[in-house]
Amino acid sequence: MTTHTLTINGEKVAITRESVLVAAADARPNVRPHRHGVLIGSVLWAPKDLLRTVIGNDDLGNVDSPRAMKAFNILGFQTFTETVYTADGLPFVHPDNQLRTQEGARP
C-alpha cells in the first residue's frame, strides 16, 4: 500500500491511494478545478478540494495546490496543470523554466 505523509498545521497526516479512492467515491467536488487538477476515475478534482475531502478537514494550513498535487501524483494519480499559450499558439514557458542553450546559461 502506497502511503504519502504531509505536514498540515504542524501535524503529520498520512494518506493512501485507497483512502483517496474511498473518499472520492463517497463525495463530489465542491469546486471546479482552475489551474491544477487530479483525475480520480472520470472526475477531475481541484487538488486542495480533494485533500480536504480525504482528510476530513477544511484547514489545510500551508498546503498549496502544487504540494497537494505532488502528494496525489506520488500515490499514482494523474495530475494536470493548466497550459498557457502565447498569441502565436505556442505553449508559454516561464523564463526560469526554459531550457539552457549552454551549460549554466539561459537563452
Image: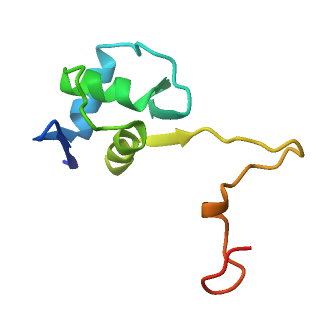
> Which of these two is toward me, 6 or 41?
6
Query: Residue 65: horizontal and vertical position, in percent?
Result: 41, 37
Residue 98 horizontal side relative to residue 7, left or right: right
- Residue 42 lies, with reference to residue 8, above or below; the image says above
- Residue 93 lies, with reference to residue 60, above or below; the image says below
Q: What residue is drawn where x is 25% and y is 30%?
A: 60
Quadrant housing residue 47: top left
Q: Residue furthest right?
A: 88
Quadrant housing residue 72: top left
Q: Total number of numbered labels?
A: 0
Q: How is the image coloured?
A: rainbow
Query: Residue 79: horizontal and vertical position, in percent?
Result: 48, 41
Q: What residue is drawn where x is 24% and y is 19%?
A: 58
- Residue 23 lies, with reference to residue 102, above or below; the image says above
> Which of these two is toward me, 51 or 24?
51
> Which of these two is toward me, 103 or 72?
103
Query: Residue 89: horizontal and vertical position, in percent?
Result: 85, 44
Residue 37 horizontal side relative to residue 88, left or right: left
- Which quarter of the rendered picture does the C terminus lie within? bottom right
Query: Residue 31: horizontal and vertical position, in percent?
Result: 45, 15
Residue 36 horizontal side relative to residue 106, left or right: left
Quadrant housing residue 56: top left
> Which of these two is toward me, 70 or 102?
102
Q: What residue is drawn where x is 24% and y is 32%?
A: 61
Q: Residue furthest bottom?
A: 103
Q: What residue is drawn where x is 28% and y is 14%?
A: 26
Residue 85 horizontal side relative to residue 41, left or right: right
